[in-house]
Amino acid sequence: MTIKTKAIVLRSVKYGDNSLIVDMLTERCGRSSFIIRLSKSSKGKFRRNLFIPLTILEVDYELKQTATLLRIKDVHVVIPLPSLLSHPYKLSIGMFLSEFLVYATRDENDNNPLYNYVEKSLQWLDGVENHFSNFHLVFMMRMTRFVGFLPYTSDYHDGDYFDMLNGSFCERAPLHSHFLTPNDASKLGILMRLDYPTMHLCVMTRPERNRCLDVILDYYRLHIPGFPELKSYQVLKELFK
């Protein structure tokens, strides 16, 4: 069965002398892994620069249920994102998001809403010129809707705690240790109400933004088994003032 689908490159790993193993989030089939034999010519079909993380491709491949690594028959860039590769801040955010998505989507199959969310978010970031310092925070919080652990925020009241295991606000601290105090809980509630055009209205210092980053990553670790420490985390924490 031949599949034609859009796909977002998440990670490329060198395999042997002239091959790559590439993990992608695809529009039709969720997470898929491919083995790519690179072209020897710079004009060949399978060039290394096609498989830079967060590149949005259209790929044709043969779907084999028993294969762990699939082989692509045809590929081309379908939505260019030039500023993600040239703007230094966007490049750092993109490095973080690609690593984050490797682990946050690894068990996703046939999740078209998730794919569309990621694609449209990357297009927004590529097109915006400023006011994107909170992008990664809003992106991660809004993505919880598509991976199954969206926090329940409609019952929030000032002074509430946030139960990270159950994804809900509560008047008193829960009996377990995985909760946010009212100060951190209020910031989480604010982030959940923001979208990309309005997120610049939430003004934060670098320490406040980094605290939110820590909290959100902890939330993902609680709900996705084996979610690791991210290598690009420290670089991202140094961005913006």
Image (cartoon, rainbow, N blue to C red):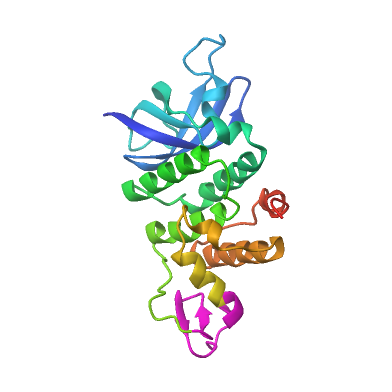
Q: Give the residue displayed 35% in from the left and 27% down from the top.
A: 61
From the viewer's side, name the closer residue of 64 and 233.
Answer: 233
- Is 144 situated above or below 185? above
Q: Is residue 234 magenta?
A: no
Coordinates of residue 174 in the picture (x, y in percent): 52, 87
Instruction: Pick the residue in front: 33 or 47.
Output: 47
Image coords of residue 116 (percent x, y):
36, 45
| Side of 205 relative to 226 (left or right) | right
Does residue 47 appear in the picture of this structure? yes
Q: How many marks?
A: 0
- What residue is drawn where x is 52% and y is 63%? 220
Is residue 226 at least partly visible in the picture?
A: no
Direction from residue 215 to residue 126 in the image, left or right: left
- Left or right for 109, reference 80: left
Magenta residues?
158-184
Q: Nearer the viewer, residue 180 or 241?
A: 241
Q: Residue at x 45, y 74 (%)?
A: 167
Instruction: Identify whether 18 is placed above or below 155.
Output: above
Q: What x and y, as percent, mark residue 158? A: 50, 84
- State which quadrant residue 213 falls in: bottom right
Residue situated furthest left in the rendering: 1
- Is 56 drawn above or below residue 89 in the view shown? above
Residue at x 67% of width, y 53% of height: 233
Residue 43 image offset from top left, x and y in percent? 52, 9
Position of the N terminus, as image quadrant, is top left
Question: Which corner quadrant holds the C terminus?
Answer: bottom right
Work out whether 207 lies above or below 174. Answer: above
